[in-house]
Amino acid sequence: MSTKNPKLSQEQNLALRGMSLQQKLEKLYKWFKANEIPKEAFEYFSNAWINKQSKKEQDLLALRSTPKENFMRMGPRSIVEGELQVFLDKLRSNVTAYITNRDASIADLTEEDRTKFGNYIRKYCTIYPDKISRLLIIGLRYPDNRKKINKFCVDWIKGQSLPFGKDYYYDHHFWGLLWEDGDFVPLDAIRLMGEREGEEFVIDSRFEKTFIKTLMPYFVAQRDKEVTRLKLAQMRDDRDHDTQVARKMKRLKAFNLLITAAEKYIAE
């Protein structure tokens, strides 16, 4: 077996010029599906490009200060904080079980839990902002069949519950926690950060430009995680292959829209 690295043709290399990482992976995938390149070339170049981009982003994140690094909890944990943590752990466990089994019933919440979720946020959003921020973040990505928890969180963050809540668009700690999430950032988070103006997605003007600049490496890092997920989805050969690929592509496009909007917003 040859130990030489696969190569692309001169025409293929020319076609890739000026493309983003996502565009290159999409093109590579199309060539692979059309049998224009072998599987070995698909594996080699997709891994090489992802690793190269990931290294650049990790270098940035390693030195950049984070929005939450100076946040400190004062005093001992209260009984309520302990209850909030137990509830958070339960929701996270449900999400993990759902991802593992892909059975929505595993994550079903009782009406008592749904009521508890809303009550915790309403009562303690200003008293225990760190815990409530984490509760909102897990709520955004929770696999709720009825989407009630997701909608509640979106509406709350939008400020539709003011004056009882707070304006999260000025809460750097909340957005920092959301974008540093180790699992995935839900599409609702992107939608919350801006809006459509014609054919263009623009960043909400309530965000400080310097803060968006601080978050940019996290936008990119999360987008690149989606690139990796897309690659894995593309290699599937089961009945969910097309659905998974389409879902990953939709997420990638959303992250790229956000990044483009953020770059423009910072430059203005």
Image: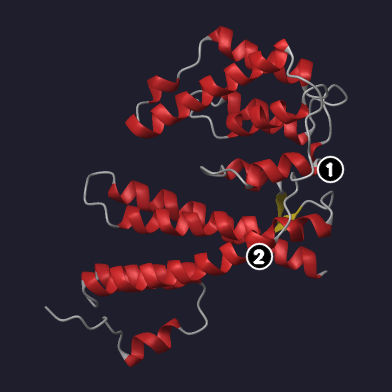
**Mark identifier at residue 156:** none
Against 220, residue 23 (above or below) is below
The amino acid type, in three-letter code, at marker 2 is Thr
Residue 40: x and y in percent read 23, 72
Asked whether residue 200 appears in the rendered view, the answer is no
Q: Nearer the viewer, residue 235 or 66?
A: 66
Seen at 23% across and 44% down, the residue is: 239
Against 162, residue 158 (above or below) is below
Residue 262: x and y in percent read 71, 61
Against 215, residue 50 (above or below) is below
Residue occupying the far bottom of the picture:
10
Question: At numbered mark 2, what does the secondary structure look like: helix, strand or loop?
Answer: helix
The amino acid type, in three-letter code, at marker 1 is Tyr
Q: Nearer the viewer, residue 128 or 257?
A: 128
Q: Nearer the viewer, residue 139 or 15?
A: 139
Q: Report which residue position mark 1 lands on.
A: 170
Marks 1 and 2 sit apart, C-alpha to C-alpha, by 21 Å
Q: Report which residue position mark 2 lands on.
A: 260
Marks 1, 2: nearer the viewer: 1
Seen at 59% across and 14% down, the residue is: 114
Question: At numbered mark 1, what does the secondary structure look like: helix, strand or loop?
Answer: helix
Q: Nearer the viewer, residue 206 or 69?
A: 69
Asked whether residue 13 appears in the rendered view, the answer is yes
> Callout 2 environment at 10 Å: few (<14), some (14 to 19), or many (20+)?
some
Residue occupying the far front of the picture:
76
Residue 120: x and y in percent read 70, 16
**Residue 219 quadrant:** bottom right
**Residue 25 quadrant:** bottom left
Seen at 22% across and 46% down, the residue is: 238
